[in-house]
Amino acid sequence: MVEEQAYVPTNEVLLDLQNVTKHFGGLAAVQDVNLQVRRGEIVSVIGPNGAGKTTVFNLITGIYRVSSGDIVLDGKSILGLTPDQVLRRGIARTFQNIRLFNNMTVLENILVGQHTQLNANILTSLFRTPGVRREEEEARKRATELLSFFGSELVSRQEEYVINLSYADRRRVEIARALAARPKLLLLDEPTAGMNEVETLEAVKYVRRLRDELGLTILLIEHKLAVTMGMSDRIYVLDYGRKIAEGLPEEVRRNEKVIAAYLGKPTASEQKAAGDAPYV
Amino acid sequence: MSAVTMNTNSTGPVSTTRSLLIKWVIALLVPVLVFNFVWQGDYLINNVILGFINPADALVDTGSLIQASIFILFFYLVVLAFAGYLVAADTGRRSMLEVWVDVLIFAVLPILLIVLVNDNLIIGLALCAILWPIYFYIRRRVPFFARSKALLSPKSVSLLSAEQKAAMVRRARLGGFAFGLSLAITWLVVDLVSYFAGALPTELLIVTAVRTVFLVVAGYFLGWVGGIVAVRLTLSANANSANGGDNSAQSGANGRRKRQLMMLASSRAREEAREVVPNDLPLRSAGARRFFLILLIAFVLFYPVLDPFLFGYGTAGRLAGYTDAGYYVILALGLNIVVGFAGLLDLGYVAFFAIGAYAWGIFGSTQFGRLTNIIIQPEVLSWLFWPMIIVTALIAALWGVILGAPTLRLRGDYLAIVTLGFGEIVPVVFLNLDKYTNGTNGIVGVRSPAFFGIQWTVINHVPYYYLILALIALVIFANVRLRDSRLGRAWIAIREDEIAAASSGVNLVRTKLFAFGTGAFFSGIAGAYFSAKLGNVSPDLFSFNDSVIYLAMVVIGGLGSIPGVIVGALAVYSINLFILNNLDSIASDPTSFLYGIDQFIIHYIPSFTFGNIRNLVFGIILVAIMIFRPEGLIPSARRKRELHQAPEEEAVELGSLDVTTTDPGFEAEVRIE
């Protein structure tokens, strides 16, 4: 069922959420969440709608301010950093609803993704120094490389406006844009949302390759239980802003609290159905 | 809708060379002839020649004559090359008649209208601007035009083979030659007729002879040049995709270019197929645009010399108008960075313009001496104008950053209101700081710049004309460089989606401040020019109305599009500050076409003046443009796409953050500094 893993995750903790809490007015969107991601792991966060999963992502990447608790990356706290600072520390993300720059081409989107990797400032841009010219040339080459991770089709469509691409392609461009910043940790927010089975299988494959070939650590939010089970090294389950379970996929799958959260009180046959063969 | 299919076996034009020649020779000949004989372009030439022959009788001095003749020569050289280019670049699929009607409307009609309104360039163009959209509308509806709509969309491309290139150049040479010949013959006939009718001085016969030979010979060689241009811009359409495969083996620059072309071609959006040569619509191709641009630049450069010939009396007045319009172009380009690129709605842009103007106003006059007790000789002050342009711009940029900083956390409407506030505050501050700025009286005696041997007076506007042209060129250059740079992309990313931009590593604070600062920098340049030219500066010159006009220029021209905002600035200036302002004086002139209309209206509404309805008319025009062409006159490709997306293309926009927006704490908590 689970094949030999090409990349063995380490025990070194890369990202550590310590008692993270977030209040919006009176509502506690996230409450006392503890979460670790080790270098080289693929960790999933699952839970019913409204459980606070995307809020956790937004807290990690600095879009929201943490009410209490700490978030530590590679030993250093990243609390209070703005999103671009978080990116520079090494965390890149994609969005649940694909936030690409719609009126830019694929290539331009990736070039913006490389913003932190380029050194051109206003003066050197104005005078187009040889350094800038070289930098732009290499940036374009790198964009092609990044797109080629997904095969040659996107490479040949570099000059298309992203709005003309299919949904699955746009997801890929968004991931390529995130990769452009050379992150250590990649946060994927529902990477298979809106996809059919074939596309989902493809997505699972390339998420695995992101870890296996590029050495990235991946934290993902996923809604499809079967996908998560087959892809993750460990799983965290959130419900109403709290962590209700964590552990290996097999453990989580049989955890009663998890089943109750997703399905209400399960009947025997429903329990059986929940143990269906996962995507591998 | 299209009934045309591509001939997949031929890679040359679909029509014969002969029909191409007829098509383009006539297409170019008619406008040139109309220009020469209806608008008296030959009057220009003849007077220049006569001026050389009898300098005493000449209309203008020899220096101007020489410049005028350079322009004439250049003009005909470019048109001859253009003829060659068109014949080479056309696939021949569009009918002759269609091209001729297009040329009639876009080239001949303007000339006729300008002549009709007593050689008034601006009103003529304004009338064109009204008639052209009507023509577009008709063209879309009438079946005759809709018939052959198929544009070339290459499925796979390859570079031209050597023999295809040679064929193209051959056609081009033939085209240039044929055009030169036709032009020479027509002109010869006209000259002979007027000679025998006694209207042509004998000396000009020599010119006629020389010109006839010259046009034919030059036509041949310049057609060649046009052919080379066409070849360099060419991709050849080849439906045979097998051809693409074996080209990838080529190495080196040629192979790379081929691969680039193939990549480009296979991903070209439909509307970009027009850039490619050979082309169904060569008049709209990238090469043709280059020719138009060259002609336009030459015309603009030589304008002061050409004006007396083409437009009659009143050169000085017209130049005064253009030198005033010029700084609006710079302001529009500067505001384009803030509003167009970065998407920050700035309603107080006049503040930075005022800062720039006062900066030179204080330094470049006796005020500086009064304030600091450092006396600088006035002549030296004039020379210091040049370094001070940069200093003024930097001062304005500094204030751009200072005034921009508080607005950074604000979105949309709130940002607009705060900037509006600054737009009001700054002139009032200048009003009240009378110790430094002389309050309501303003500062007089602001020095004009100095340059070797040139008089910068209020009467002779030519130096200012070239100064503003140079400044505009620099500003355009800077804008283009910035737009295509890391910073420009960051600005556009912010405009598209701030959160995604921040998550991609764009520092929102710094990038927005750079936008404000750079925009203010350009307005500082305009400000220095403004007060130097005007000679004085006072607070009442700057008001909120001006900020709105600048914004109108940017929006009407095309947000984010550099050629767009230039045209927008000129258009709004012409309409609002020139035409509408002067309608009354035109209407009172019995020889103008407005006189009759004016009298007719006064018959029914005795208290009517055009001045009264000026704002009404301007408002109606703005609303009309926003309804029918919201993307602006020359939109950037993005904007057009943004505003005219087909419904099925629209992305599904859902709220992307998990928390509902009705939560009270939401807005306060999202911190995208």
Image (cartoon, coloured by chain):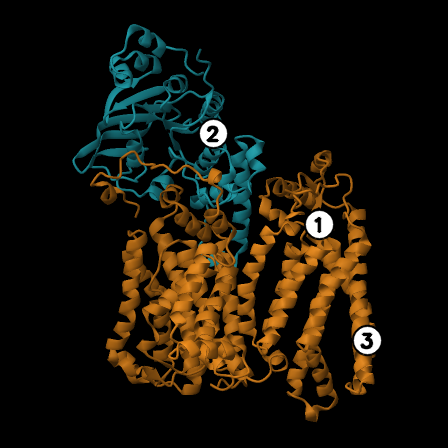
Residue in view at x 39 percent, y 83 percent: B446
Mark 3 sits on what residue? B189
Q: Secondary structure at mark 2?
A: loop
Q: Secondary structure at mark 3?
A: helix
Vertically, is B30 above or below B230?
below
Specify whether disc 3 shares its chain with disc 1: yes
3 vs 1, front mark:
3
**Whether label 3 touches label 2, CB < 8 Å:** no
Mark 2 sits on what residue? A214
Q: Badge 2: few (under 14), some or many (20 or more) residues near its Cα, within 10 Å? A: some
Give left or right: position of B246 versus A101. right
**Whether label 2 touches label 1, CB < 8 Å:** no
Viewer-nearest residue: B173 or B669: B173
Q: Amino acid at mark 2?
A: Leu
Viewer-nearest residue: B290 or B632: B632
Q: Is residue A40 visible?
A: yes
Mark 1 sits on what residue? B278
Residue in view at x 31 percent, y 9 percent: A271
* Furthest residue in direction bottom, as rendered: B56
| Image coordinates for residue B641, horizontal then vertical, percent | 49, 47
Q: Colour of chain A?
A: cyan
* Furthest residue in direction top, as rendered: A268
- Tell which subunit mark 2 falls on: A
| Image coordinates for residue A156, horizontal then vertical, percent | 59, 37
Q: Colour of chain B?
A: orange
Specify whether disc 2 shares its chain with disc 1: no
Q: Quadrant of the N terminus of chain A?
A: top left
- Tell which subunit mark 3 falls on: B
